[in-house]
Image (tube, rainbow, N blue to C red):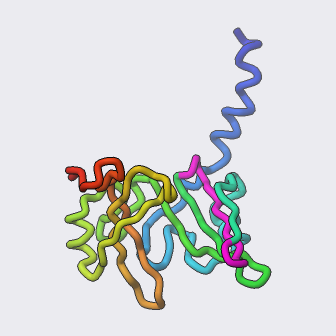
Amino acid sequence: MHRSLTPLIPLLAAAIVIPSASAIESTINPGVGIGRVKLGMSATQVKRAMGTGFLVNKRRTINGVRYVELGWDFDSWAVTFVQRGKTLRVAQVSTTVRSQKTAKGIGLATSWRKVVAAYPSGHCAFGNPFGPNALSYYLEYLVPHEGGTQTIYTFRAVFSKEQQEPSATS
């Protein structure tokens, strides 16, 4: 039995010693960032704040502009960078961690009624985050901020292309 546990000891030690991205302060600051990750930061600054335990989710060049999305902590955090000159800068930060909330208590799984009550200046839109061939659309609530940034809250699927009519969700 002692022999079978030996290979696990370095893995367990690594799990204890290496902090995950979710352990970092995680207040959502609408129009600014989440925790220590702020819009406009360089990729080097983000890696210093979040650590090097990331995966590259996407790389794209659109109309000559390079975009790179990195994910931390099994994609609990995703940061999208846009290349400005020679430097990649944060253009978007997203989270799927329920404990990460705004000062008004808004975060993952918050009802749309609470989001609208907290941020009444927002605008509704429909988004399709899974590409043009996806079967559902999602309700998005876009909250503008000074300086031209915005926070986008995404809610469950509300429209099915197969049905061609809104589906009942709450």
Quadrant for the N terminus in the image: top right
The residue lying at 40 percent from left, 85 percent from top is 145
Could you tell me what secondary structure mostly forms the magenta stretch? strand
* Highlighted magenta segment, given as a residue range: 62-75
Of the pair 47 and 79, the residue shown nearer to us: 79
Q: Is residue 22 magenta?
A: no
Image spot of residue 141 (x, y percent): 33, 70
Q: How many marks?
A: 0
The residue lying at 36 percent from left, 75 percent from top is 142
Of the pair 166 and 9, the residue shown nearer to us: 166
Image spot of residue 138 (x, y percent): 36, 59
Image spot of residue 156 (x, y percent): 33, 54
Q: Is residue 73 magenta?
A: yes
Q: Is residue 84 left or right of residue 134?
A: right
Give the image quarter of residue 153: bottom left
The residue lying at 38 percent from left, 83 percent from top is 144
* Residue 86 vertical position relative to residue 4 in the rendered view, above or below: below
